[in-house]
Amino acid sequence: MKIEKDIITDIKVFKNINPSTIDEIVEKSDIITLKKNECLYKDRQVLEYVYFVLKGKVYIAKCNRLNELKIIFLINKFNTINQPLMMNNTSAVECWGYEDTEILRIRFDVFDKLMSNDYILARNCMLYMEKRIRSLYRQLKNTSNTNIKERLASKLFKLSLEYGVKENYMTKIDLKITVTHLSKMLGCQRETLSRAIKDLKDDNSIKIINQKFYIDIQKIKKLSNGSN
């Protein structure tokens, strides 16, 4: 598949990098497709590439000791999937297609040389990692909250910031979310989550239409404050 320069510059870590770096990326990268529910890589797998989402969404997940998959990040277009630098190039997580996805990939050795010759690219990658680490800190803080209703409200509020579309007095989260995916994001059982969803429906904080959540942003934000 032919790679256009305009697509490259839309990727967030490629903003304002040298034109010569863009030319090398076009020359030395390629595009692959990942189907919904298809695995891009597994935990402890040795990787050869840095991956970037061009279209669609993937999620990063980790299994616990009970072999239950916890979704850590949902990654949408123009974002980086894995770290540009990895110890022994070995993944510590899994990556799966949330929906049909197009992915740009660049070999680690090529990307390492690009960063060494382009400070802006290296800086952008460090800032990307810093942002992801901050998100992990917030997730770690929220795991101490056993109130699943508050944790659900917090997750819905955060999703609304990225995918929210105002519709009348509600905000639609323009993302199809199954109860299974949401339970994996929160690290809880489906049954527990279903009860929390029912509670939020009963007090008119949310409604669900065609697997999409509509939320009363003020009610959800107020409830989510207990989890932040």
Image: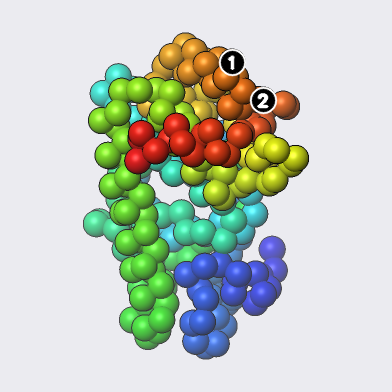
Where in the figure is residue 33, as x and y percent of width and height?
62, 50
Residue 100 visible in the current orientation: no
Residue for badge 2: 208
Q: Tell me what residue is drawn at x 51 percent, y 74 percent.
A: 14
Please state if 198 lies on the left or on the right of 147 as rendered: right
Please state if 174 lies on the left or on the right of 118 as rendered: right
Q: Is residue 28 above or below residue 163?
A: below
Please state if 153 lies on the left or on the right of 35 as rendered: left
Name the quadrant containing residue 150.
Answer: top left
Where in the figure is residue 143, as x and y percent of width and height?
29, 32
Where in the figure is residue 107, as x and y percent of width and height?
44, 65
Q: Is residue 139 above or below residue 84?
A: above
Circle 1 crowding by C-alpha within 10 Å: few under 14, some 14–19, many from 20 = few
- Specify the label residue 202 is tagged with: 1
Mark 1 secondary-structure assignment = helix
Return the residue nearer the eye: 177 or 70.
177
Q: Tell me what residue is drawn at x 24 percent, y 57 percent.
A: 87
Mark 2 secondary-structure assignment = strand
Q: Is residue 91 above or below residue 113?
A: above
Q: Tell me what residue is drawn at x 30 percent, y 28 percent.
A: 145
User: Which of labels 1 and 2 is toward the front?
Assistant: 1
- Amino acid beneath label 2: Ile
- Amino acid beneath label 1: Asp
Q: Tell me what residue is drawn at x 27 percent, y 39 percent.
A: 141
Instruction: State how far apart marks 1 and 2 are (Cα).
Output: 12 Å
- Specify the label residue 189 is tagged with: none
In primary-sequence order, the first of circles 1 and 2 is 1
Residue 160 visible in the current orientation: yes
Return the residue nearer the eye: 153 or 60.
153
Quadrant, the N terminus: bottom right
